[in-house]
Image (cartoon, grey):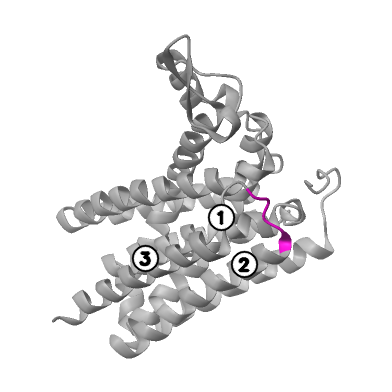
Amino acid sequence: MEITKVTYLVFALVIAVALALDLGLLSKKNTVITIKKALFQTLFWVTLAIGFFVFLWFEQDRKHALEYLSAYVMEWSLSIDNIFVFIIIFSAFKVREKFYGRVLLIGILMAIVFRIIFITIGVALVDQFSWILYLFAIFLLYTGYKMFTSTEEEEFDPQESKVYKFLRRFLPIANHDGNGKFIVKANGRPVYTSLFVVVILLATIDVVFALDSIPAVMGISRDKLIIYTSNTFAVLGLRSLFFLLRGAVSKFDYLQQGIAIVLVFIGVKMLTEKWINLYIDKESQVLLSLLVILACIAGSIVYSVYHQKKGTPKDIQ
């Protein structure tokens, strides 16, 4: 069996076993997840992701392993932006805390399916039209610039979003959670609860975030294996990360600027790759990218802790 097929097989087995453990042993239906349990689950998913990095190092080579780690760290840091929006969605639809876990799980699994579709299309387009990478690079430069210079984010209102309005137009929506159900009967016909709406919003919001992250990952590696696995591990760990950080996410005021610098760095790297290759070998480029990503993310978090912006919202309980 080829090395790549073995790697895909190991990856699929790890994900299957991990989900079984997470759902069967670490999570129970309709229960509140404590900080302690969230920390344990986060360490569980991070350990699996690092373990896969070690596996790639020995099964393939150091370059692929470092590409995977760089992509995973970047995706993981971008997840914190998702968490802030998730909190707003839960609050807007008054989701009870005991339903958070199941709603997040279903939304995240749907998001992974959408990401796989996006990645497959993106890789196919790049294989067919290599110049699309330059469009991705310009898009990253623009996104990074907008993120860095943004001083005040517009308040996201889920009930004013196009997705919610679309659902309201074509589906009968109930203004309650159905006591944990996604579909209930009303006057003999099916009605979709607020939990169903929240699941759809979580999945579609993640697709919006993927418009930034997938081009950025392709700036780190063109290998489909690296793109698929780094995205999957980062997104699967998002649920536990939500419960761990939801009370402190407002502290990371300058993380956005750190991510912006990373996006600009990757965009410049993509545009100048032809000249960079003349002076720096591929493996050194990957290592440099990893160091820049780690420095920007860690630096922005540390800076946020010691320089909190005035007027930021209090931590969400």
The label nearer to you, 3 versus 1, is 3
Q: Nearer the viewer, residue 16 or 81?
A: 16
User: Three-letter amino acid code at disc 3?
Assistant: Ala
Mark 3 Cα within 10 Å, few/some/many (few <14, many 20+)? Answer: few
Could you tell me which quadrant the N terminus lies in? bottom left
User: Three-letter amino acid code at disc 1?
Assistant: Arg
The label nearer to you, 1 versus 2, is 1
Q: Secondary structure at mark 1?
A: helix
**Does residue 271 appear in this view?**
no
Which residue is most to the front? 188
Residue lying at 61% horizontally and 59% vertically, measured from the top left: 241
Q: Is residue 179 left or right of residue 17?
A: right
Residue at which label 2 appears: 297
Q: Secondary structure at mark 3?
A: helix
Mark 1 Cα within 10 Å, few/some/many (few <14, many 20+)? Answer: many
Mark 3 vs mark 1, CA separation in Å: 16 Å
Q: Is residue 7 magenta?
A: no
Q: Which residues are magenta?
A: 31-35
Placement of 189 over or under 48, stated as above or below: above
Q: Nearer the viewer, residue 289 or 134?
A: 289
Residue at which label 3 appears: 16
Instruction: Determine which quarter of the picture holds residue 95.
Output: top right
User: Three-letter amino acid code at disc 2?
Assistant: Ile
Task: Tell how many labels.
Answer: 3
Placement of 147 over or under 177, stated as above or below: below
The label nearer to you, 3 versus 2, is 3
Mark 1 vs mark 2, CA separation in Å: 20 Å
Labels 3 and 1 touching (C-beta < 8 A): no
Q: Residue 239's mark? A: 1
Q: Secondary structure at mark 2?
A: helix
